[in-house]
């Protein structure tokens, strides 16, 4: 609780910087307009104008907030929450791809990690590649996956989900391998003295002790999945989803739209990671591992 | 049929070889540790080649590795131009600017516990956000050339490095800091001789995370507009022309560049933090 005040101060400072930057960046356009009309503007008029431009270089925070409200809350009140102009609809398109991809990627990642821990040949052949793959800009292949799957006739949610799955896969593999190996020799030996079978050792020792690692990598994987889904929406030509809103905004110079899509994505990411954090808190507490 | 049969035979042989190698008495030697993943990678390439040829997959869907290799060999000049544009101008310059700005900021805010308590959660929060989304905005501000890519990279690497550095600066233990005080060391001396060296493992952790982010940022920012060179530009246009061998060639270059970049930073880490338990280990 004692860090509420510092956090608020920092957020306030960021907002103040943002307003200042908005005035600086948008001033030129205002001055040009005034010069063309042959007017002289006072400082107050300039500042007021920079806050309310149609296509500002940097929209002021309240403009972004208003656009966010207009495309979400206001549309819900009008009963048009799932129309094409609504960010809720675009957000849902992105979210569904993210969640499907995250599910697939996490599931496969855990399976591979179990295989790696129990099979030495798999460990030695796959593990170096799984680690190396984290240093590779995997996101670069997103456009290709989309276009190739499109030409085979698969479009819509699945290609984006595949990219998401791919991005969340490797963090989960690496994290879970570390987690499943985290019980120390002594504990494993103890289970052997009980003559526990490998599956008992897995369910009673390895799996529970991998939980903290699992949740950490789930958070990383979830953030990566969302980025994957957003980038996956770029090559389809700005039709649906938050990524499409970003691209369309950049085509038509609609900066307010870009910023509101960006904030929607940020809120989505924060919520998803927050939910995992909450589940982590509850699970670890019930398992007696809370720190 | 010959291709498919050959693939199956090769796969079975490689699998048997790997299983045998990894259970053999020499499994701890470095040669075997290197050979097993190499055989696995080679198997994937052979299976890929064989399946594409055996099943007659058209090259607009998946080109065989040999075609990609031939494309890399025949278009080295284009690949080099793209590499310079995206990696050296975009990613590397942004990486240097972003990381040094982050380390300097961390040292500055480290003097104020109040700022630290406020900035750390906010920085952690921002580090988890899809910052790549700022790419269209920054491209609009800084133009199509490498400056906008460097700006995206700066935005992407700044917070991970900042958060890690702030944590690292707190890593020296109170006993060591007290010792510095008994020697009446100044703030600057304590910083240079104790706290920065102690922070190095954390800083390098951030720097290593940032290598991948830098390359991703530079490539994806090019999807939003770029001059007619650059890896992201080439990938998006060649995908549009269905010249997938060129796309794979760019991806191979990106993968190599990413791993080499990471490897270099890891080497630097080994040289700087030779005293840390994680480096002394094996």
Image (tube, rainbow, N blue to C red):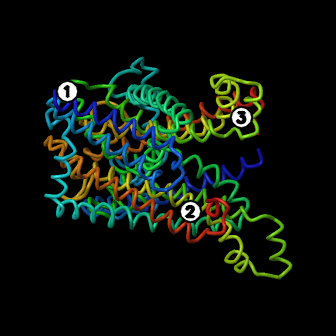
Tag 3, which secondary structure? helix
- The residue shown at (67%, 61%) is B277
Marks 1 and 3, how far apart in space? 49 Å
| Tag 2 subunit | B
Q: Chain under label 1?
A: A
Specify few, some or many for label 1: CA neighbours under 10 Å numbering under 14, 14-19, or 20 or more. few
Q: CA distance from mark 1 to mark 2?
A: 43 Å
Residue topped by disc 1: A152
Q: Position of residue B205 (x, y in %)?
A: 56, 58
Q: Secondary structure at mark 2?
A: helix
Q: Quadrant of the C terminus of chain B?
A: bottom right
B273 or B113, nearer to the observer:
B273
- Left or right: A214 as drawn, with respect to B96: right
Q: Are marks 1 and 2 on the same chain?
A: no
Disc with the residue nearer the chain's start (1 vs 3): 1
Res. A66 in view: no
Labelled disc at residue B204: 2
Which residue is nearer to you in this view: B107 or A207?
A: A207
């Amino acid at each position: 609780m004692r860090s509420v005040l510092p956090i608020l101060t920092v957020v306030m400072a960021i907002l103040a910087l943002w307003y200042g930057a908005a005035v600086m960046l948008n001033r030129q356009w205002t001055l040009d307009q005034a010069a063309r009309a042959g007017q002289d503007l006072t400082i107050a008029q300039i500042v007021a104008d920079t806050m309310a431009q149609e296509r500002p270089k940097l929209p002021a925070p309240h403009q972004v907030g208003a656009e966010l409200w207009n495309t979400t809350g206001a549309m819900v009140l009008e009963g048009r929450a799932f129309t094409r102009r609504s960010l809720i609809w675009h957000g849902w398109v992105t979210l569904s791809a993210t969640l499907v991809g995250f599910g697939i990627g996490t599931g496969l990642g855990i399976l591979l990690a179990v295989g790696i821990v129990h099979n030495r040949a798999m460990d030695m052949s796959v593990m170096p590649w799984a680690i190396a793959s984290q240093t590779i800009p995997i996101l670069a292949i997103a456009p290709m996956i989309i276009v190739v799957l499109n030409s085979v006739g698969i479009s819509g949610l699945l290609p984006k989900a595949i990219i998401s799955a791919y991005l969340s896969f490797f963090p989960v593999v690496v994290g879970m391998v570390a987690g499943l190996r985290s019980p120390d020799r002594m504990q494993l030996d103890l289970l052997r003295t009980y003559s526990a079978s490998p599956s008992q050792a897995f369910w009673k020792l390895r799996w529970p002790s991998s939980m903290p690692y699992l949740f950490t990598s789930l958070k990383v994987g979830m953030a990566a999945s969302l980025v994957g889904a957003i980038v996956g929406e770029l090559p389809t030509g700005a039709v649906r989803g938050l990524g499409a809103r970003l691209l369309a905004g950049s085509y038509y110079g609609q900066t307010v739209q870009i910023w509101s899509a960006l904030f929607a994505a940020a809120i989505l990411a924060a919520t998803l990671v927050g939910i995992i954090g909450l589940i982590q808190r509850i699970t670890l507490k019930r398992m007696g591992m809370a720190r | 049929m010959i291709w498919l049969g050959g693939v199956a035979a090769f796969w079975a042989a490689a699998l048997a070889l790997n299983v045998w190698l990894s259970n053999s008495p020499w499994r701890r030697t470095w040669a075997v540790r290197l050979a097993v993943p190499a055989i696995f990678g080679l198997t994937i390439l052979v299976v890929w080649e064989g399946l594409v040829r055996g099943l007659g997959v058209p090259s607009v869907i998946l080109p065989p590795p040999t075609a990609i290799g031939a494309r890399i060999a025949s278009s080295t000049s284009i690949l080099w131009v793209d590499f310079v544009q995206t990696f050296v101008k975009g990613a590397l310059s942004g990486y240097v600017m972003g990381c040094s700005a982050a380390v300097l900021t961390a040292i500055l805010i480290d003097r104020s516990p109040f700022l630290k308590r406020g900035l750390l959660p906010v920085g952690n929060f921002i580090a988890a956000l899809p910052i790549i989304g700022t790419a269209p905005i920054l491209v609009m501000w800084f133009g199509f050339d490498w400056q906008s890519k460097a700006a995206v990279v700066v935005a992407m690497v700044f917070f991970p490095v900042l958060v890690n550095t702030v944590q690292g600066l707190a890593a020296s233990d109170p006993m060591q800091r007290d010792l510095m005080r008994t020697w009446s060391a100044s703030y600057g001396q304590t910083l240079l001789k104790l706290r920065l060296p102690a922070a190095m493992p954390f800083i390098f952790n951030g720097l290593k995370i940032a290598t991948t982010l830098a390359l991703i940022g530079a490539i994806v920012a090019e999807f939003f507009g770029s001059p007619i060179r650059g890896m992201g530009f080439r990938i998006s246009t060649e995908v549009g022309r269905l010249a997938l061998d060129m796309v794979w060639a760019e991806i191979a270059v990106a993968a190599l560049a990413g791993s080499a970049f990471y490897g270099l930073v890891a080497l630097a880490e080994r040289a700087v933090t030779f005293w840390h338990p994680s480096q002394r280990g094996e």
